[in-house]
Image (cartoon, grey):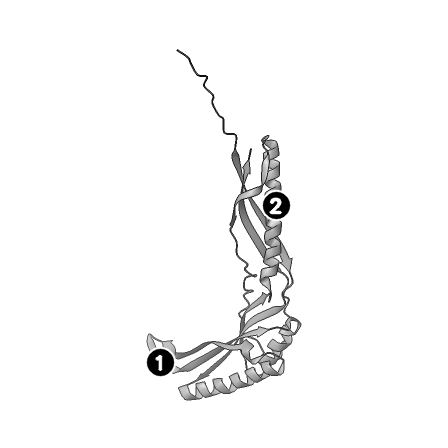
């Protein structure tokens, strides 16, 4: 009886999975500011009328400083009954009316001046100053490319140390980040009209994170 030789095939293919992360620091070119007007009166119509008059002055101030009309949006309008509490008794004292504008300022070097003029015109609340880039996608793409290079260099190192050959064409790439700008700089405060507003935007951190799987043999 003839016996055929037995051949065993060994699969030497493998994979290396690595992560890559890179952060770019870029200068913002716009600011988004919430500017509010708060008025109080025992009579609701009076409080609303005062708020509307001051709001019109604030909007005009923004327009005079070069802010485009489409970059001024009402983001919030609220009316609150106000009460005093004494000896366990609730006494009505009037109404508070709040109107908040979301303002996009495209001349970033004028942010402080524009805020000051809005305060002088009647604004009495400024909050949520956010510095942004008008074209964040391009910066994110640069960070993404550098994150991939980091992942590739890691894979080269690991394949060399484990006596494997790396296939430079990745098996899969998973993007774990999104092109998100810097978070809000929380600066909720009430301002006096004679104060000078010094605003330092700093830089925006744009981070890309990926996971890459490479084949080896």
Residue 57's disc is none
Q: Is residue 157 left or right of residue 51?
A: right
Looking at the image, which residue is at 33% across and 77% down? 89
Q: Is residue 211 visible?
A: yes
Q: Secondary structure at mark 1?
A: strand
User: Farthest residue toward the left?
Assistant: 89
- Judge by depth and name the residue closer to the eye, 98 or 161: 161
Q: Nearer the viewer, mark 1 or mark 2?
A: 2
- Of all residues, the one furthest to the front in this rendering is 1
Q: Residue 106: x, y in percent?
A: 62, 73
Q: CA distance from mark 1 to mark 2?
A: 65 Å
Query: On the image, numbered disc 1 is attached to which residue?
Result: 91
Q: Residue 150, which numbered label?
A: 2
Question: Residue 108's x, y, as percent?
Answer: 64, 71
Mark 2 lies on a secondary structure that is helix
Q: Is residue 196 visible?
A: no
Report the front residue among 113 and 206: 206
Q: Earlier in the sequence, mark 1 or mark 2?
A: 1
**Residue name at image x 58 percent, y 31 percent:** 162
């Amino acid at each position: 009886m003839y016996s055929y030789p037995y051949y065993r095939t060994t699969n030497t293919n493998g994979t290396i999975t690595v992560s890559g992360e890179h952060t770019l620091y870029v200068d913002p070119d716009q600011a988004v500011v919430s500017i509010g007007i708060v008025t109080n009166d025992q009579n609701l119509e009076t409080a609303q009328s005062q708020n509307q008059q001051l709001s019109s002055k604030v909007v005009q101030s923004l327009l005079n400083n070069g802010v485009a009309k489409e970059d001024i949006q009402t983001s919030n309008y609220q009316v609150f009954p106000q009460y005093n509490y004494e000896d366990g008794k609730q006494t009505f004292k009037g109404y508070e009316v709040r109107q908040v504008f979301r303002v996009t300022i495209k001349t970033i070097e004028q942010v402080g001046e524009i805020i000051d003029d809005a305060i002088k015109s009647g604004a009495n609340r400024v909050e949520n100053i956010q510095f942004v880039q008008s074209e964040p996608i391009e910066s994110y793409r640069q960070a993404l490319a550098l994150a991939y290079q980091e992942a590739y260099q890691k894979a080269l190192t690991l394949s060399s140390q484990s006596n494997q050959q790396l296939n430079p064409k990745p098996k899969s790439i998973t993007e774990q980040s999104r092109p998100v700008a810097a978070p809000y700089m929380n600066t909720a405060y009430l301002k006096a009209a004679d104060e000078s507003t010094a605003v330092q935007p700093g830089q925006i951190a744009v981070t890309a994170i990926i996971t890459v799987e490479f084949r080896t043999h």
